[in-house]
Image (spheres, grey):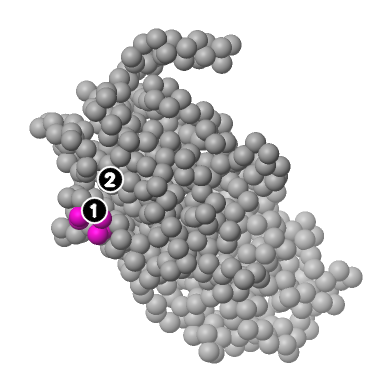
Amino acid sequence: MRKNFFAFLLAITLLLPSVAFGQAVVKISNAERAMATGVTAEQLKQYLYFVASDAMGGRDTPSQGLDVTAEFIKMNLWKWGFKPAGDNGTFFQKMTLNREAVDTANAFMEVGGQRYAFGEDFFRMAGNTTGTLEKPLVFVGNGWLVKSKNIDSYAGLDVSGKIVVVQMQGAPTNASLRILPKGVTQADLKPAAKGTDWADPAAYAQQKGAAGLIYIASPELQGFWGQIKQFLGRGGAMKVKGLEDEPAPTTSALPVILASQKVGEALFAGESANSVKTPDTAPFTFSPAKKIGISVKGITDTATTQNVVAIWEGSDPILKNEMVAIGAHYDHVGTNPNAPGPDKIWNGADDDGSGTVAVLAIAEALAKAKTRPKRSILFVWHAGEEKGLWGSEYFNKFPTVDIKQVVAQLNIDMIGRSRKADDVNPKNKDLSGENAIYVIGAEMMSSTLGAITKQTNDAYLKMTYDYRYDDPKDTNRFFFRSDHFNYAVNGIPVAFWFDGVHEDYHGPGDHADKIDYAKMEKVTRTIMLTMLEISDLKERPKVDKQLPAELTQR
């Protein structure tokens, strides 16, 4: 019924100059339409072929390729007359990255007299240890505590002073390498209940007094081994200074090791008929004769990266003090020298080169327009999204502008790919079509933002807006996986445009020649007009929806 009613409203728009429902009325002026035509497919293509070129090396955070991309964005912003809004009158907001790296020359792991190489067969995730660990080994399945799911890996076990061995399952969904047990979702892990109602394997092992923890990679995780080498190959996970709400894993007193399946086979050899265990295997104590040696010593490793931040000042003497934010993450996952095929560079053309250049094209169109929006427009290109939404979290915790004056944030993360009618690849089954795009978050927080988002599209190009992921209970958790999330945590209404996961998602095949530039032009123009409509509202969009628990608990 709702579908038919919506179709009726859509038909009326053909007869009226504006679309009206919800809490807002969109009237797209000729001047605004002309402004949007400043975004062109050719312009987007030229920028993306540069940003996603091999010369950028996959734009890892941190990397020279990412820095060159930042300089490219900065150069254009300066040329077009934007106001720097980063640190100390610059376009950059600098972030310091700290990592306790490993003295790789002297690092090793030994099982039954066989030595294994650091960075190849095992990695340190936390802590330091030197020499042979003369401690009993205990297998504890998946290692988790989740009371709501009746999961307690250490039930009836005394692991105090022992080394626990955990068999991982499945594959990670992001750079944190967190893999949840079967039947558990992120929604089950309430932040306020951490340590009491639930605990991840490392936290639970330390809570139980274990002497160390060894994760054995799952077959799926082993498939990510090349990327893990990039992430952990020099030591522990890198952290952004100022974002350590919890102790950094590398400062933990508990030594935590991630070992390959090959090491796992050596550990389990002789312990039962099967050399490799599953997370469902019952806990058991290893033979006292099974000795292991691990030596990993930390050394200091520091780097810097940056968000790129600029403002286009509004025309209204009062409203210009408020800002509509628009952004994208300009990083990707870098180069994988151990990739099995000839292509070693993860170019990230769609993820998120497409968003990066879409925001840049909007900036250029705005700068060349004859009129200005009433509110100011805040442009932020975020670094480190692939590492855990670093740039957006840092910007929201240490803003270089008055963040309370940001009335909404529009996030563009993957808008360049489309599924053709004859595409039968199952990996593309959720990829949006040539005239479609997923919209996430717009209706989750603010009725006004939701109405503006819909109305702008209906009054302009009438693309198919797919809202299937606009739900905090979405099992893919897309609302929580891109930079808009940290603005939402800050109480700012958000909208996120996304084309969907496809065959080249986080793979070496995400190249600029596979982008649908005609679609990308349509989406970018529509987002620009949405931005302009919000900028001219008499009142800022209000948060009038019940927020997801993850927002209210942070």
> 205 or 353, which lies in front?
353
In front here: 282 or 494?
Answer: 494
Q: Residue at x 17, y 41 (%)?
A: 313
Q: Is residue 547 magenta?
A: no
Q: Mark 1 points at which residue?
A: 77
Q: Position of residue 453 (x, y in %)?
A: 39, 28
Name the element at disc 1: helix
Q: Which residue lies furthest to the front in this view?
A: 42
Is residue 84 depicted above or below 190 in this figure? below
At 41% from the left edge and 14% from the top edge, which residue is drawn? 13
Quarter of the N terminus within the rendering: top right
The answer to which image quadrant residue 171 occupies is bottom right
- Give, as a single range, the part of the protein colored magenta: 74-79
Residue 93 visible here: no
What amino acid is labelled 1 in the image?
Leu
Counting from the top left corner in percent of width and height, residue 364 is at 27, 46
Side of 505 relative to 540 (left or right): right
Which mark identifies residue 363?
2
User: What amino acid type should be assigned to the residue bearing mark 2?
Assistant: Ala
Q: Where is residue 97 in the image (x, y as percent from the top left)?
A: 37, 68
Q: In this rendering, would 393 be left or right of 172? A: left
